[in-house]
Image (cartoon, rainbow, N blue to C red):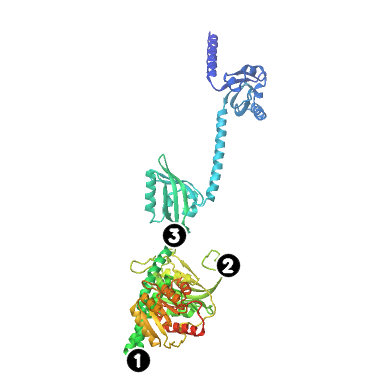
């Protein structure tokens, strides 16, 4: 009874297994090794996967191995035989390809187990074969995709490294955390961090943004996130090596789960910003020059009246008269005011520098003498002069101004503490390799003025702006911001260059490079020129200021000329046209309401081409000399030097007439 029951149970289990195997997508198989190798069972899925009837497998010995792909068969046979021969490892796992009769190829994962007899000898192998073709295709597609992605990343990295800006992705989560999923290597030039550093920790980027720009950057970021509009912004970065730089950023936002991500690029626009600042600088100078020109014209007219009448009054008094001494002080003050106006015009580039070839040491020593009486007593001045420094062509007054402005700046930097101001003059030779990156210096010999202090020093951001007009670190009412801009303008006007070296807490050094000239000569102002006098020649004197007409008449009459004066250029032209040969010379102002001196001269010369004309002006614009030459003007005199220069100018004109010559270009006094 028990045997019958066990047989029935086995038959029932066999039927259940057959039903289960027919439902499975895998292939169940049994392979007998004894007495000879032969497949004794495969499940129905074999025909679907292998593409051939199971009966073929039962009937043909070795068909199982023959179905394996030829490229995989040798390795499979070797591994299979090795597995059967090694004791202790009853199971195996192998992947291989099979060839179907229709030419198709399928990938198989085969998992088998060895069954041994009582002596440990393998007598049967059972297993499950799984069709993994789709998985293999998916893996191959994934590998191809990864290769493609890797290639794309490599190409993107190449493009980003060659791009002029920085490519980046920036993420802001809803809870305020920031990150950089991607940043090209050039981001180091912008923020001073390696791309890998920012990708690992983006929080540190905030410390690099200029404190004054952080609120605006934050506000723009949140607005872009809320409205999903482009993030376009210019802001400053405090780079640890490059100092303050300007960045232009453009990026597009995209909403993602938990936050917003921006993809875009950063561009270093520091050079453009500097160019814009230089343009603004030029525009300020142009506006200041226009203002200075108008002021100079009016002031020079006033100064001419003051100096001229003072000179006339002194001529009527004995030198030991008490009033003579007082008038001398008035004249000296007027001369200083005249020089101040000329410096304003020099800063605005509306006057020519009066250059003479001089030794630099005595010029600097003169400036230091004045400095010692004006600087605070706690500041010590140390001067060092290298012997045999070559002569240079400079405007002495402007060199004085450079020393004064730099010293004043140094005194402010040293504050109330005891300080040392070092001033030195030496000669240097710059080699071509030393000036490769400089556009304001060339190889050659230079005289160098160095002014150093041990004051508070300057940071990089301040250094970048010290030559901007109206920029100052002083509190309101304590400075105009023009001092260093004037220095820069004077040095450039002398074809030189300024170099500044400074660090916070370590003082500041200015080095002025001025190109070497020929031998030093005595200033023409020091020459003893005898007073030139007339011989009754008739002068027409024209100026819209009646006080200057009065002064001009008195001065010229004292010099021996006959003078007819006019304050209206139209009336002067009418009088001349009525009697063009009555006048031997015409002296006219340049800037007059209703008719300029050039227009007046042109009208007179049409009537009488040989008429000598002398022109006076409060300032000489860059084009005035050329216009004077084209208009036939014989002499150009800068007010308020008219009193000193007019007699000599008329003497030159009449001497040229007597000699039958004519100047090639009108000199300006």
Q: Position of residue 263 (x, y in %)?
A: 46, 45
**Relative height, residue 20 to residue 425 (above, below):** above
- SS for callout 3: helix
Q: Which residue is mark 3?
A: 276
Mark 1 vs mark 3, foreground winner is 1
Which comes sooner in the sequence, label 2 or label 1?
1
Callout 1–callout 3 Cβ contact below 8 Å: no
Left or right: where 207 falls relative to 24:
left
| Quarter occupied by residue 262 | top left
Residue at x 46%, y 86% (from the top left corner) = 529
Mark 2 vs mark 1, foreground winner is 1
Left or right: where 360 falls relative to 218:
right
Residue at x 53%, y 68% (from the top left corner) = 441
Total marks shown come to 3
Q: Which mark is residue 432?
A: 2
Q: Which residue is mark 1?
A: 318
Q: Nearer the viewer, residue 167 or 642?
A: 642
Instruction: Classify 10 Å Cα crowding around label 2: few (below 14), some (14-19), many (20 and above).
Output: few
Q: Position of residue 586 (x, y in %)?
A: 42, 80
| Quarter occupied by residue 4 | top right
Callout 3–callout 2 Cβ contact below 8 Å: no
Which comes sooner in the sequence, label 3 or label 2?
3
Residue lying furthest top: 1
Left or right: where 442 falls relative to 570:
right
Q: Is residue 469 among the parts visible in the rendering? A: no
Q: Nearer the viewer, residue 80 or 400?
A: 400
């Amino acid at each position: 009874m028990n045997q019958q029951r066990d047989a029935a149970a086995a038959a029932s289990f066999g039927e259940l297994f057959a039903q289960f195997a027919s439902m499975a997508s895998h292939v169940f198989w049994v392979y007998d090794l004894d007495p000879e190798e032969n497949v004794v069972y495969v499940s129905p899925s074999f025909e679907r996967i292998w593409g051939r009837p199971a009966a073929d497998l039962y009937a043909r010995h070795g068909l199982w191995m023959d179905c394996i792909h030829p490229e995989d068969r040798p390795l499979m046979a070797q591994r299979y035989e090795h597995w059967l021969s090694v004791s202790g490892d009853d199971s195996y796992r192998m992947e291989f390809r099979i060839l179907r009769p229709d030419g198709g190829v399928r990938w198989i994962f085969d998992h088998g187990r060895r069954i041994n007899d009582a002596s440990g000898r393998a007598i049967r192998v059972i297993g499950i074969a799984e069709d993994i073709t789709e998985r293999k295709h998916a893996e191959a597609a994934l590998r191809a995709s990864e290769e493609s992605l890797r290639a794309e990343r490599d190409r993107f990295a190449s493009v980003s490294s060659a791009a002029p800006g920085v490519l980046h992705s920036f993420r802001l989560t809803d809870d305020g955390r920031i990150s950089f999923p991607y940043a090209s290597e050039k981001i180091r030039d912008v923020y001073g961090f390696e791309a890998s550093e920012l990708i690992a920790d983006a929080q540190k980027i905030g410390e690099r943004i200029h404190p004054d720009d952080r609120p605006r950057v934050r506000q723009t970021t949140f607005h872009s996130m809320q409205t999903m509009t482009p993030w376009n912004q210019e802001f400053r970065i405090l780079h640890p090596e490059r100092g303050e730089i300007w960045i232009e950023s453009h990026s597009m936002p995209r909403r993602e789960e938990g936050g917003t991500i921006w993809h875009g690029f950063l561009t270093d626009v520091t050079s453009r910003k500097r160019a814009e600042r230089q343009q603004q600088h030029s525009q300020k100078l142009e506006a200041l020059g226009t203002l200075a020109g108008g002021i100079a014209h009016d002031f020079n007219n006033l100064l001419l009246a003051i100096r001229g009448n003072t000179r006339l009054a002194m001529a009527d008094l004995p030198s030991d008269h008490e009033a003579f001494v007082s008038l001398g002080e008035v004249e000296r003050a007027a001369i200083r005011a005249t020089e101040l106006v000329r410096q304003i015009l020099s800063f605005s580039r509306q006057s020519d520098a009066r250059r003479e070839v001089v030794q630099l040491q005595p010029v600097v020593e003169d400036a230091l003498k004045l400095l010692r009486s004006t600087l605070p007593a706690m500041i010590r001045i140390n001067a060092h002069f290298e012997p045999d420094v070559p002569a240079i062509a400079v405007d002495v007054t402007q060199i004085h101004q450079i020393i004064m402005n730099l010293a004043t700046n140094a005194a402010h930097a040293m504050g109330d503490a005891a300080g040392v101001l070092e001033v030195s003059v030496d000669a240097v030779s710059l080699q071509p390799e030393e000036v490769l990156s400089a556009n304001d210096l060339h190889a050659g010999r230079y005289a160098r003025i160095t002014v150093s202090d041990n004051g508070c020093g300057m940071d990089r951001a301040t250094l970048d702006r010290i030559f901007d007009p109206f920029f100052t670190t002083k509190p309101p009412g304590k400075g105009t911001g023009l001092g260093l801009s004037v220095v820069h303008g004077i040095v450039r006007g002398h074809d030189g260059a300024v170099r500044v070296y400074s660090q916070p807490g370590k003082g500041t050094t200015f080095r002025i490079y001025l190109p070497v000239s020929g031998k030093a000569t005595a200033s023409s102002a020091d020459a003893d020129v005898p007073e030139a006098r007339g011989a009754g020649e008739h002068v027409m004197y024209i100026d819209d200021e009646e006080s200057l007409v009065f002064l001009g008449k008195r001065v010229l009459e004292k010099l021996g000329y006959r003078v007819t004066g006019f304050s209206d250029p139209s009336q002067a032209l009418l009088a001349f046209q009525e009697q063009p040969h009555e006048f031997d010379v015409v002296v006219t102002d340049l800037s007059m309401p209703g008719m300029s001196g050039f227009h007046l001269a042109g009208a007179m010369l049409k009537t009488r081409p040989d008429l000598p004309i002398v022109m006076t002006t409060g300032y000489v614009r860059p084009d005035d000399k050329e216009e004077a030459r084209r208009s036939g003007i014989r002499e150009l005199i800068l007010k308020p030097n008219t009193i000193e220069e007019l007699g000599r100018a008329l003497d030159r004109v009449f001497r040229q007439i007597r000699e039958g010559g004519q100047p090639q270009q009108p000199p300006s006094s």
